[in-house]
Protein backbone atom coordinates (compact mmCIF):
# COMPACT_ATOMS: atom_id res chain seq x y z
CA UNK A 1 0.00 0.00 0.00
CA UNK A 2 3.00 2.25 -0.31
CA UNK A 3 2.67 5.43 -2.29
CA UNK A 4 5.76 5.82 -4.47
CA UNK A 5 4.77 9.31 -5.60
CA UNK A 6 4.52 10.74 -2.08
CA UNK A 7 7.71 11.74 -0.24
CA UNK A 8 8.79 9.14 2.34
CA UNK A 9 7.05 9.31 5.70
CA UNK A 10 10.50 9.34 7.22
CA UNK A 11 14.02 9.22 5.90
CA UNK A 12 17.14 8.98 8.04
CA UNK A 13 20.60 9.13 6.52
CA UNK A 14 24.10 8.69 7.91
CA UNK A 15 22.95 8.58 11.52
CA UNK A 16 25.73 8.21 14.09
CA UNK A 17 25.06 7.93 17.81
CA UNK A 18 27.72 7.27 20.42
CA UNK A 19 27.38 6.68 24.15
CA UNK A 20 30.89 7.18 25.52
CA UNK A 21 33.00 4.51 23.90
CA UNK A 22 29.94 2.61 22.59
CA UNK A 23 28.89 3.29 19.03
CA UNK A 24 25.17 2.52 19.10
CA UNK A 25 24.50 3.62 15.50
CA UNK A 26 27.23 3.72 12.89
CA UNK A 27 26.16 5.75 9.81
CA UNK A 28 22.82 3.99 9.47
CA UNK A 29 19.85 4.96 7.40
CA UNK A 30 16.24 3.97 6.96
CA UNK A 31 13.51 5.09 4.56
CA UNK A 32 9.87 4.36 5.32
CA UNK A 33 7.57 5.13 2.39
CA UNK A 34 4.12 6.64 2.94
CA UNK A 35 1.72 3.81 3.77
CA UNK A 36 4.57 1.34 4.27
CA UNK A 37 4.51 -1.16 7.07
CA UNK A 38 8.22 -1.44 7.69
CA UNK A 39 9.87 -3.83 10.13
CA UNK A 40 13.15 -3.08 11.89
CA UNK A 41 14.80 -6.21 13.24
CA UNK A 42 18.14 -7.05 14.79
CA UNK A 43 19.72 -8.85 17.70
CA UNK A 44 19.71 -7.41 21.21
CA UNK A 45 21.92 -4.36 21.23
CA UNK A 46 21.84 -3.89 17.44
CA UNK A 47 20.72 -0.26 17.83
CA UNK A 48 16.94 -0.41 17.24
CA UNK A 49 15.86 1.51 20.35
CA UNK A 50 18.56 4.09 19.78
CA UNK A 51 17.23 4.70 16.27
CA UNK A 52 13.72 5.06 17.72
CA UNK A 53 14.95 7.69 20.15
CA UNK A 54 16.59 9.59 17.27
CA UNK A 55 13.47 9.33 15.07
CA UNK A 56 11.25 10.61 17.89
CA UNK A 57 13.51 13.51 18.88
CA UNK A 58 14.42 12.06 22.29
CA UNK A 59 18.10 11.85 21.35
CA UNK A 60 20.06 14.11 19.02
CA UNK A 61 22.34 12.14 16.71
CA UNK A 62 26.06 12.94 16.58
CA UNK A 63 25.81 13.01 12.78
CA UNK A 64 23.28 12.47 10.03
CA UNK A 65 19.87 13.89 9.20
CA UNK A 66 16.21 13.00 9.50
CA UNK A 67 13.37 14.25 7.30
CA UNK A 68 9.61 13.71 7.56
CA UNK A 69 7.68 13.88 4.28
CA UNK A 70 10.65 15.64 2.74
CA UNK A 71 10.90 18.37 5.39
CA UNK A 72 13.73 18.56 7.95
CA UNK A 73 12.96 17.13 11.37
CA UNK A 74 11.88 19.62 14.06
CA UNK A 75 14.57 21.16 16.24
CA UNK A 76 15.63 19.28 19.38
CA UNK A 77 13.27 20.11 22.23
CA UNK A 78 10.40 21.24 19.96
CA UNK A 79 8.02 18.70 21.51
CA UNK A 80 4.93 19.89 19.68
CA UNK A 81 6.84 19.82 16.39
CA UNK A 82 7.94 16.21 16.92
CA UNK A 83 4.45 15.16 18.06
CA UNK A 84 3.00 16.39 14.79
CA UNK A 85 5.39 14.11 12.85
CA UNK A 86 5.83 10.89 14.77
CA UNK A 87 4.76 8.91 17.81
CA UNK A 88 6.03 5.72 19.38
CA UNK A 89 3.80 3.20 21.10
CA UNK A 90 6.12 1.61 23.65
CA UNK A 91 5.68 -1.54 25.68
CA UNK A 92 5.65 0.68 28.72
CA UNK A 93 2.67 2.95 28.86
CA UNK A 94 3.11 6.61 28.06
CA UNK A 95 -0.34 7.54 29.31
CA UNK A 96 -0.88 8.94 32.80
CA UNK A 97 -2.84 6.26 34.69
CA UNK A 98 -4.53 8.65 37.15
CA UNK A 99 -6.08 10.73 34.35
CA UNK A 100 -9.07 9.86 32.20
CA UNK A 101 -8.75 8.81 28.58
CA UNK A 102 -10.05 12.25 27.51
CA UNK A 103 -7.49 14.04 29.66
CA UNK A 104 -4.70 11.88 28.30
CA UNK A 105 -5.78 12.57 24.74
CA UNK A 106 -5.59 16.32 25.25
CA UNK A 107 -2.74 16.44 27.74
CA UNK A 108 -0.64 19.59 27.30
CA UNK A 109 -2.78 20.84 24.45
CA UNK A 110 -4.60 23.54 26.35
CA UNK A 111 -3.40 26.32 28.57
CA UNK A 112 -4.47 25.70 32.19
CA UNK A 113 -7.66 27.47 33.22
CA UNK A 114 -9.21 27.43 29.78
CA UNK A 115 -10.43 23.86 29.84
CA UNK A 116 -14.14 23.13 29.51
CA UNK A 117 -14.44 19.54 30.63
CA UNK A 118 -17.70 18.69 28.91
CA UNK A 119 -16.36 20.01 25.60
CA UNK A 120 -13.13 18.07 26.13
CA UNK A 121 -15.03 14.82 26.73
CA UNK A 122 -17.12 15.40 23.62
CA UNK A 123 -14.03 16.05 21.53
CA UNK A 124 -12.37 12.96 22.91
CA UNK A 125 -15.44 10.91 22.00
CA UNK A 126 -15.38 12.29 18.45
CA UNK A 127 -11.68 11.67 18.10
CA UNK A 128 -11.91 8.05 19.28
CA UNK A 129 -14.87 7.48 16.98
CA UNK A 130 -12.98 8.97 14.04
CA UNK A 131 -10.23 6.36 14.45
CA UNK A 132 -12.66 3.58 15.29
CA UNK A 133 -11.43 3.15 18.87
CA UNK A 134 -14.10 1.76 21.15
CA UNK A 135 -13.01 3.14 24.53
CA UNK A 136 -14.97 5.23 27.05
CA UNK A 137 -13.30 8.69 27.23
CA UNK A 138 -14.31 9.05 30.89
CA UNK A 139 -12.54 5.82 31.94
CA UNK A 140 -9.35 6.15 33.95
CA UNK A 141 -6.37 5.36 31.71
CA UNK A 142 -4.98 3.12 34.44
CA UNK A 143 -8.05 0.88 34.12
CA UNK A 144 -7.57 0.22 30.40
CA UNK A 145 -6.25 -3.05 29.06
CA UNK A 146 -2.90 -2.97 27.26
CA UNK A 147 -4.76 -3.26 23.97
CA UNK A 148 -7.12 -0.35 24.68
CA UNK A 149 -4.22 1.76 25.90
CA UNK A 150 -2.29 1.16 22.68
CA UNK A 151 -5.31 2.14 20.59
CA UNK A 152 -5.69 5.34 22.61
CA UNK A 153 -2.00 6.13 22.08
CA UNK A 154 -2.34 5.55 18.32
CA UNK A 155 -5.45 7.76 18.14
CA UNK A 156 -3.62 10.43 20.12
CA UNK A 157 -0.66 10.36 17.71
CA UNK A 158 -2.91 10.62 14.67
CA UNK A 159 -4.85 13.48 16.21
CA UNK A 160 -1.61 15.48 16.42
CA UNK A 161 -1.31 15.04 12.65
CA UNK A 162 1.41 12.36 12.72
CA UNK A 163 1.43 10.11 9.67
CA UNK A 164 4.22 7.92 10.96
CA UNK A 165 3.91 5.66 14.00
CA UNK A 166 6.59 3.51 15.58
CA UNK A 167 5.48 0.38 17.41
CA UNK A 168 8.12 -1.06 19.72
CA UNK A 169 7.23 -4.68 20.48
CA UNK A 170 3.53 -3.83 20.64
CA UNK A 171 2.42 -7.45 20.82
CA UNK A 172 4.54 -8.37 23.83
CA UNK A 173 1.63 -8.20 26.26
CA UNK A 174 -1.25 -9.11 23.96
CA UNK A 175 -2.86 -12.50 23.50
CA UNK A 176 -3.53 -14.00 20.08
CA UNK A 177 -6.94 -12.32 19.64
CA UNK A 178 -5.55 -8.97 20.78
CA UNK A 179 -2.70 -9.23 18.28
CA UNK A 180 -5.17 -9.88 15.47
CA UNK A 181 -7.26 -6.84 16.44
CA UNK A 182 -4.15 -4.66 16.55
CA UNK A 183 -3.03 -5.90 13.13
CA UNK A 184 -6.49 -5.28 11.66
CA UNK A 185 -6.39 -1.70 12.95
CA UNK A 186 -2.88 -1.16 11.58
CA UNK A 187 -3.83 -2.51 8.14
CA UNK A 188 -6.82 -0.19 8.08
CA UNK A 189 -4.67 2.83 8.91
CA UNK A 190 -2.05 1.81 6.38
CA UNK A 191 -4.73 1.92 3.69
CA UNK A 192 -5.28 5.54 4.72
CA UNK A 193 -1.60 6.26 4.07
CA UNK A 194 -0.26 6.04 7.64
CA UNK A 195 3.22 4.50 7.75
CA UNK A 196 4.54 2.22 10.49
CA UNK A 197 7.90 1.19 11.79
CA UNK A 198 7.35 -2.12 13.54
CA UNK A 199 9.96 -3.50 15.94
CA UNK A 200 9.59 -7.09 17.00
CA UNK A 201 11.61 -10.15 17.92
CA UNK A 202 8.74 -12.30 16.60
CA UNK A 203 9.75 -12.80 13.02
CA UNK A 204 6.44 -14.42 12.12
CA UNK A 205 4.71 -11.14 12.93
CA UNK A 206 7.04 -9.37 10.52
CA UNK A 207 5.90 -11.76 7.81
CA UNK A 208 2.24 -11.39 8.79
CA UNK A 209 2.13 -7.61 8.92
CA UNK A 210 4.99 -5.92 7.09
CA UNK A 211 5.78 -5.02 3.47
CA UNK A 212 9.44 -4.14 3.97
CA UNK A 213 12.11 -5.18 6.44
CA UNK A 214 15.35 -3.49 7.49
CA UNK A 215 18.01 -5.38 9.41
CA UNK A 216 20.60 -3.77 11.69
CA UNK A 217 23.53 -5.65 13.10
CA UNK A 218 26.15 -4.30 15.53
CA UNK A 219 25.08 -0.69 14.99
CA UNK A 220 25.16 -0.99 11.18
CA UNK A 221 22.56 -1.24 8.47
CA UNK A 222 22.75 -4.69 6.84
CA UNK A 223 19.87 -4.83 4.40
CA UNK A 224 16.47 -3.52 3.41
CA UNK A 225 14.22 -5.74 1.30
CA UNK A 226 10.59 -6.51 0.54
CA UNK A 227 9.45 -9.06 3.12
CA UNK A 228 7.99 -11.28 0.42
CA UNK A 229 11.40 -11.68 -1.19
CA UNK A 230 13.30 -12.66 1.94
CA UNK A 231 13.13 -16.17 3.41
CA UNK A 232 13.19 -16.64 7.16
CA UNK A 233 16.61 -18.27 7.17
CA UNK A 234 18.04 -15.41 5.09
CA UNK A 235 16.54 -12.95 7.52
CA UNK A 236 18.03 -14.69 10.55
CA UNK A 237 21.37 -14.98 8.74
CA UNK A 238 21.33 -11.21 8.14
CA UNK A 239 20.60 -10.61 11.82
CA UNK A 240 23.30 -12.92 13.14
CA UNK A 241 25.89 -12.52 10.41
CA UNK A 242 26.20 -16.27 10.17
CA UNK A 243 25.39 -18.09 7.00
CA UNK A 244 24.29 -21.21 8.82
CA UNK A 245 20.96 -20.65 10.39
CA UNK A 246 20.47 -21.78 13.95
CA UNK A 247 16.86 -22.92 13.88
CA UNK A 248 15.34 -23.32 17.34
CA UNK A 249 17.87 -25.81 18.64
CA UNK A 250 15.91 -26.77 21.70
CA UNK A 251 13.52 -29.61 21.63
CA UNK A 252 11.31 -30.87 24.33
CA UNK A 253 12.75 -33.57 26.51
CA UNK A 254 15.86 -33.70 28.57
CA UNK A 255 19.23 -34.47 27.12
CA UNK A 256 20.18 -38.12 26.77
CA UNK A 257 22.73 -38.04 29.58
CA UNK A 258 20.33 -36.44 31.99
CA UNK A 259 17.58 -38.86 31.00
CA UNK A 260 19.90 -41.78 31.70
CA UNK A 261 21.01 -40.29 35.00
CA UNK A 262 17.43 -39.73 36.03
CA UNK A 263 16.15 -43.15 34.98
CA UNK A 264 15.84 -44.47 38.50
CA UNK A 265 14.45 -41.25 39.88
CA UNK A 266 10.78 -41.61 39.15
CA UNK A 267 10.12 -42.42 42.77
CA UNK A 268 12.51 -39.80 44.08
CA UNK A 269 11.08 -36.82 45.89
CA UNK A 270 9.85 -34.05 43.67
CA UNK A 271 11.99 -30.93 43.66
CA UNK A 272 8.89 -28.75 43.63
CA UNK A 273 5.39 -29.77 44.57
CA UNK A 274 2.14 -27.80 44.56
CA UNK A 275 -0.64 -29.30 46.68
CA UNK A 276 -4.12 -27.88 46.15
CA UNK A 277 -2.43 -24.52 45.63
CA UNK A 278 -5.07 -21.87 44.98
CA UNK A 279 -5.63 -18.14 44.72
CA UNK A 280 -9.27 -17.15 45.14
CA UNK A 281 -10.76 -15.63 42.02
CA UNK A 282 -7.55 -16.15 40.04
CA UNK A 283 -6.82 -19.87 39.84
CA UNK A 284 -8.52 -22.95 41.26
CA UNK A 285 -6.73 -25.56 43.42
CA UNK A 286 -3.99 -27.21 41.40
CA UNK A 287 -1.66 -30.15 42.10
CA UNK A 288 1.57 -30.88 40.31
CA UNK A 289 5.08 -32.11 40.96
CA UNK A 290 8.30 -31.26 39.16
CA UNK A 291 10.88 -34.00 39.40
CA UNK A 292 14.68 -33.71 39.30
CA UNK A 293 15.81 -33.23 35.72
CA UNK A 294 12.43 -31.98 34.60
CA UNK A 295 11.25 -28.72 33.03
CA UNK A 296 7.54 -28.09 33.50
CA UNK A 297 5.65 -25.60 31.36
CA UNK A 298 2.70 -23.60 32.70
CA UNK A 299 1.00 -22.43 29.52
CA UNK A 300 -1.84 -19.98 29.21
CA UNK A 301 -3.01 -16.79 27.58
CA UNK A 302 -3.33 -13.45 29.38
CA UNK A 303 -5.59 -13.79 32.44
CA UNK A 304 -5.48 -17.61 32.32
CA UNK A 305 -3.91 -17.61 35.77
CA UNK A 306 -0.59 -19.10 34.67
CA UNK A 307 1.42 -15.99 35.52
CA UNK A 308 -0.36 -15.66 38.87
CA UNK A 309 0.43 -19.31 39.58
CA UNK A 310 4.12 -18.69 38.82
CA UNK A 311 4.07 -15.59 41.02
CA UNK A 312 2.50 -17.59 43.82
CA UNK A 313 5.22 -20.24 43.59
CA UNK A 314 7.91 -17.59 44.02
CA UNK A 315 6.16 -15.85 46.92
CA UNK A 316 5.06 -12.69 45.10
CA UNK A 317 1.46 -13.56 45.80
CA UNK A 318 0.09 -15.29 48.89
CA UNK A 319 -1.92 -18.41 48.12
CA UNK A 320 -5.41 -18.53 49.62
CA UNK A 321 -5.28 -22.31 49.80
CA UNK A 322 -2.90 -25.26 49.61
CA UNK A 323 0.87 -25.20 49.84
CA UNK A 324 4.16 -25.29 47.96
CA UNK A 325 6.99 -27.65 48.91
CA UNK A 326 10.61 -27.68 47.80
CA UNK A 327 12.33 -31.04 48.27
CA UNK A 328 9.63 -32.06 50.73
CA UNK A 329 9.70 -28.91 52.88
CA UNK A 330 6.82 -26.46 52.98
CA UNK A 331 7.71 -22.96 51.79
CA UNK A 332 6.33 -20.05 53.78
CA UNK A 333 3.66 -18.52 51.54
CA UNK A 334 3.67 -14.97 50.22
CA UNK A 335 7.34 -14.25 50.90
CA UNK A 336 9.93 -13.86 48.16
CA UNK A 337 12.90 -14.06 50.59
CA UNK A 338 11.57 -17.35 52.02
CA UNK A 339 10.99 -18.78 48.57
CA UNK A 340 14.52 -17.74 47.60
CA UNK A 341 15.90 -19.26 50.80
CA UNK A 342 14.02 -22.48 50.09
CA UNK A 343 15.80 -22.74 46.73
CA UNK A 344 13.31 -21.18 44.34
CA UNK A 345 15.05 -18.95 41.77
CA UNK A 346 12.90 -16.43 40.01
CA UNK A 347 13.03 -14.70 36.63
CA UNK A 348 10.30 -12.04 36.65
CA UNK A 349 8.26 -10.97 33.69
CA UNK A 350 8.67 -7.25 34.22
CA UNK A 351 12.39 -6.75 34.43
CA UNK A 352 11.97 -2.98 34.71
CA UNK A 353 10.11 -3.06 37.97
CA UNK A 354 11.11 -6.33 39.56
CA UNK A 355 14.42 -7.14 38.00
CA UNK A 356 17.26 -4.70 38.18
CA UNK A 357 18.84 -1.84 40.11
CA UNK A 358 19.40 0.65 37.29
CA UNK A 359 22.38 2.65 38.56
CA UNK A 360 24.40 -0.43 39.52
CA UNK A 361 26.81 -2.36 37.34
CA UNK A 362 26.16 -5.54 35.40
CA UNK A 363 28.33 -7.41 37.94
CA UNK A 364 26.45 -6.06 40.95
CA UNK A 365 23.08 -6.79 39.42
CA UNK A 366 24.09 -10.29 38.38
CA UNK A 367 25.24 -11.11 41.90
CA UNK A 368 22.67 -9.29 44.03
CA UNK A 369 21.34 -12.56 45.38
CA UNK A 370 24.72 -14.12 46.16
CA UNK A 371 26.73 -11.40 47.81
CA UNK A 372 26.85 -13.57 50.93
CA UNK A 373 28.60 -16.28 48.96
CA UNK A 374 31.15 -14.09 47.26
CA UNK A 375 33.08 -12.98 50.31
CA UNK A 376 33.47 -13.80 54.02
CA UNK A 377 31.24 -12.21 56.66
CA UNK A 378 29.06 -10.39 54.22
CA UNK A 379 31.84 -8.50 52.51
CA UNK A 380 31.90 -8.64 48.75
CA UNK A 381 35.15 -9.36 47.03
CA UNK A 382 35.03 -7.39 43.80
CA UNK A 383 37.38 -9.81 42.06
CA UNK A 384 35.08 -12.76 42.59
CA UNK A 385 32.02 -10.69 41.71
CA UNK A 386 33.67 -9.72 38.46
CA UNK A 387 34.68 -13.29 37.70
CA UNK A 388 31.20 -14.60 38.29
CA UNK A 389 29.70 -11.82 36.17
CA UNK A 390 32.19 -12.46 33.38
CA UNK A 391 31.21 -16.15 33.31
CA UNK A 392 27.57 -15.14 32.99
CA UNK A 393 28.36 -12.56 30.30
CA UNK A 394 30.07 -15.29 28.30
CA UNK A 395 27.55 -18.08 28.77
CA UNK A 396 24.47 -15.89 28.17
CA UNK A 397 26.13 -13.83 25.41
CA UNK A 398 25.41 -10.51 27.15
CA UNK A 399 26.43 -7.60 24.93
CA UNK A 400 28.22 -5.23 27.29
CA UNK A 401 31.53 -3.40 27.51
CA UNK A 402 32.23 -5.37 30.70
CA UNK A 403 31.06 -6.28 34.22
CA UNK A 404 31.49 -2.68 35.44
CA UNK A 405 29.08 -1.14 32.89
CA UNK A 406 25.90 0.24 34.51
CA UNK A 407 23.05 -2.12 33.72
CA UNK A 408 20.85 0.80 32.62
CA UNK A 409 23.19 1.30 29.64
CA UNK A 410 22.40 -2.15 28.25
CA UNK A 411 19.75 -2.77 25.61
CA UNK A 412 16.44 -4.23 26.83
CA UNK A 413 17.19 -7.80 25.76
CA UNK A 414 20.59 -7.75 27.38
CA UNK A 415 19.07 -6.49 30.63
CA UNK A 416 16.78 -9.50 30.59
CA UNK A 417 19.83 -11.75 30.38
CA UNK A 418 21.29 -10.09 33.49
CA UNK A 419 18.05 -10.88 35.34
CA UNK A 420 18.46 -14.52 34.37
CA UNK A 421 22.11 -14.49 35.41
CA UNK A 422 21.04 -13.25 38.82
CA UNK A 423 18.47 -16.00 39.22
CA UNK A 424 21.07 -18.61 38.30
CA UNK A 425 23.69 -17.20 40.63
CA UNK A 426 22.34 -19.03 43.67
CA UNK A 427 22.14 -22.35 41.85
CA UNK A 428 18.47 -22.70 42.75
CA UNK A 429 16.83 -26.09 43.29
CA UNK A 430 14.07 -24.95 41.01
CA UNK A 431 14.12 -22.03 38.61
CA UNK A 432 10.74 -20.39 37.95
CA UNK A 433 10.94 -18.23 34.83
CA UNK A 434 8.04 -16.10 33.68
CA UNK A 435 8.15 -15.43 29.92
CA UNK A 436 11.94 -15.63 30.10
CA UNK A 437 12.61 -14.81 26.46
CA UNK A 438 10.38 -11.71 26.17
CA UNK A 439 12.37 -9.08 24.28
CA UNK A 440 15.26 -11.47 23.64
CA UNK A 441 16.50 -11.89 20.07
CA UNK A 442 16.02 -15.05 18.10
CA UNK A 443 19.57 -16.34 18.55
CA UNK A 444 19.89 -15.48 22.25
CA UNK A 445 16.56 -17.23 22.85
CA UNK A 446 18.17 -20.56 22.11
CA UNK A 447 21.12 -19.85 24.39
CA UNK A 448 18.85 -18.72 27.15
CA UNK A 449 16.44 -21.62 26.95
CA UNK A 450 19.49 -23.88 26.82
CA UNK A 451 20.60 -22.43 30.15
CA UNK A 452 17.16 -23.10 31.67
CA UNK A 453 17.31 -26.64 30.29
CA UNK A 454 20.78 -26.95 31.84
CA UNK A 455 19.38 -26.28 35.32
CA UNK A 456 17.24 -29.39 34.94
CA UNK A 457 19.97 -31.39 33.27
CA UNK A 458 22.23 -30.96 36.31
CA UNK A 459 19.52 -32.64 38.43
CA UNK A 460 17.52 -29.64 39.61
CA UNK A 461 14.23 -28.51 38.06
CA UNK A 462 12.67 -25.61 36.20
CA UNK A 463 9.23 -24.16 35.57
CA UNK A 464 8.59 -21.98 32.52
CA UNK A 465 5.46 -19.83 32.62
CA UNK A 466 4.69 -18.65 29.11
CA UNK A 467 2.37 -18.47 26.13
CA UNK A 468 5.30 -18.61 23.71
CA UNK A 469 5.51 -21.94 21.92
CA UNK A 470 9.29 -21.64 21.61
CA UNK A 471 9.61 -21.33 25.39
CA UNK A 472 7.30 -24.29 25.94
CA UNK A 473 9.13 -26.53 23.50
CA UNK A 474 11.96 -26.85 26.04
CA UNK A 475 9.57 -28.41 28.55
CA UNK A 476 9.18 -32.11 29.27
CA UNK A 477 5.59 -31.56 30.27
CA UNK A 478 3.17 -28.69 29.79
CA UNK A 479 0.11 -27.88 31.88
CA UNK A 480 -2.29 -25.55 30.08
CA UNK A 481 -4.51 -23.18 32.06
CA UNK A 482 -7.62 -21.38 30.93
CA UNK A 483 -9.69 -19.05 33.09
CA UNK A 484 -7.87 -20.20 36.20
CA UNK A 485 -8.34 -23.93 35.60
CA UNK A 486 -6.07 -26.65 34.28
CA UNK A 487 -7.63 -27.49 30.93
CA UNK A 488 -5.09 -29.97 29.54
CA UNK A 489 -1.73 -31.55 30.19
CA UNK A 490 0.72 -32.56 27.48
CA UNK A 491 3.79 -34.77 27.35
CA UNK A 492 6.64 -33.77 25.09
CA UNK A 493 4.98 -34.74 21.81
CA UNK A 494 2.35 -31.96 21.62
CA UNK A 495 1.53 -30.20 18.42
CA UNK A 496 1.42 -26.41 18.18
CA UNK A 497 -2.20 -26.55 17.16
CA UNK A 498 -3.30 -28.58 20.17
CA UNK A 499 -1.44 -26.46 22.68
CA UNK A 500 -2.69 -23.21 21.14
CA UNK A 501 -6.24 -24.60 21.18
CA UNK A 502 -5.89 -25.48 24.86
CA UNK A 503 -4.60 -21.99 25.69
CA UNK A 504 -7.62 -20.57 23.91
CA UNK A 505 -9.93 -22.72 25.98
CA UNK A 506 -10.79 -25.33 23.38
CA UNK A 507 -10.69 -28.85 24.74
CA UNK A 508 -7.86 -30.93 23.27
CA UNK A 509 -8.94 -33.42 20.67
CA UNK A 510 -7.68 -36.94 19.87
CA UNK A 511 -5.17 -38.55 22.20
CA UNK A 512 -3.37 -35.36 23.19
CA UNK A 513 -5.58 -34.66 26.18
CA UNK A 514 -4.75 -35.18 29.81
CA UNK A 515 -2.02 -37.78 29.91
CA UNK A 516 -1.18 -38.50 33.48
N1 LIG B 1 22.20 5.36 27.51
C1 LIG B 1 23.14 4.53 27.06
N2 LIG B 1 24.40 4.58 27.53
C2 LIG B 1 25.34 3.73 27.07
N3 LIG B 1 25.14 2.79 26.12
C3 LIG B 1 23.91 2.70 25.61
C4 LIG B 1 22.84 3.55 26.05
N4 LIG B 1 21.71 3.22 25.36
C5 LIG B 1 22.08 2.20 24.53
N5 LIG B 1 23.38 1.90 24.68
C6 LIG B 1 24.13 0.87 23.94
O1 LIG B 1 23.87 1.03 22.57
C7 LIG B 1 23.77 -0.24 21.93
C8 LIG B 1 22.45 -0.33 21.18
O2 LIG B 1 21.38 -0.44 22.13
P1 LIG B 1 19.83 -0.44 21.72
O3 LIG B 1 19.07 -0.29 23.00
O4 LIG B 1 19.61 0.57 20.67
O5 LIG B 1 19.67 -1.91 21.13
P2 LIG B 1 18.35 -2.68 20.61
O6 LIG B 1 18.63 -3.10 19.21
O7 LIG B 1 17.16 -1.84 20.86
O8 LIG B 1 18.33 -3.98 21.53
P3 LIG B 1 17.10 -4.85 22.21
O9 LIG B 1 16.59 -5.77 21.15
O10 LIG B 1 17.80 -5.64 23.29
O11 LIG B 1 16.10 -3.88 22.77
C9 LIG B 1 23.93 -1.28 23.01
O12 LIG B 1 25.26 -1.76 22.99
C10 LIG B 1 23.66 -0.53 24.30
O13 LIG B 1 24.38 -1.07 25.37
Image (spheres, grey):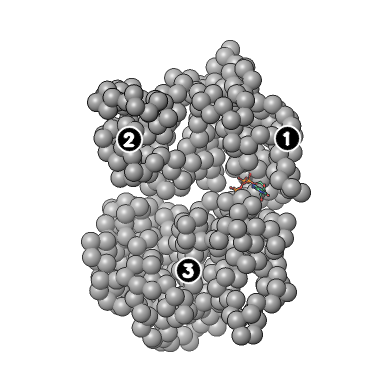
Tell me how far mark 3 sits from mark 1, CA to CA. 40 Å
Q: Which mark is residue 346?
A: 3
Image quarter hosting the C terminus: bottom left
> How much space separates mark 2 and mark 3, taking CA atoms?
35 Å
Q: Quadrant of residue 5?
A: top right
Identified at 53% across, 29% down, the residue is: 79
Decide: is 178 above or below 492. above
- 326 or 14: nearer the eye? 14
> Could you tell me residue 21's position as x and y percent?
76, 49
Residue at disc 1, secondary structure: loop
Residue at (47%, 45%) from the top-left corner? 91
- Looking at the image, which residue is at 30% across and 41% down? 140
Q: Residue at x 69, y 63 (%)?
A: 403
Callout 2: helix, strand or loop?
Answer: helix
| 404 relative position to 73: left or right | right
The mark nearer the N terminus, 2 or 1, is: 1
Residue under pointer 2: 101
Sequence-first disc among 3 and 1? 1
- Front-lying residue, 318 or 189: 318
Asked if the residues shown at circle 2 and circle 1 are in contact, with their CB atoms under 8 angstroms apart, the answer is no
Name the residue beneath numbered marker 1.
62
Tell me where residue 432 appears, x and y as whole percent: 46, 69
Q: Which disc number belongs to residue 73?
A: none
Q: How far is disc 2 from disc 1 in space, using C-alphas? A: 37 Å
**Local crowd size for mark 2, using a 10 Å CA cut-off: few (<14), some (14–19), many (≥20):** many
Residue lying at the far top of the rendered structure: 5
Q: Is residue 153 left or right of residue 425?
A: left
Q: Position of residue 72 (x, y in %)?
A: 64, 20
Amino acid sequence: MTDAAAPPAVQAEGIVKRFGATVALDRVGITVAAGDSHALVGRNGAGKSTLVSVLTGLQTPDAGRVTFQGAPAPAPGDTAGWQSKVACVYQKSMVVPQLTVAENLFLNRFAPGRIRWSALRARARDLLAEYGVDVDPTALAGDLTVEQRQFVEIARALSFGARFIILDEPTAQLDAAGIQRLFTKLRELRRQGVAFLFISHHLQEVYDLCDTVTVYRDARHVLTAPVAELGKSELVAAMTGESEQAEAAWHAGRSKDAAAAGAGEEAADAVLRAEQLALDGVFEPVDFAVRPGEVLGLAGATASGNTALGETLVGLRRATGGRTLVRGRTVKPGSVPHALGAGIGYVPEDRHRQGLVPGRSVAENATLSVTDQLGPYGTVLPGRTRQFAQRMIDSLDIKTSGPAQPVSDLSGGNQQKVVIARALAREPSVLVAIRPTAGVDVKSKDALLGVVRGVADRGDAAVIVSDELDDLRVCDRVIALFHGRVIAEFGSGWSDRDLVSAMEGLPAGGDEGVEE
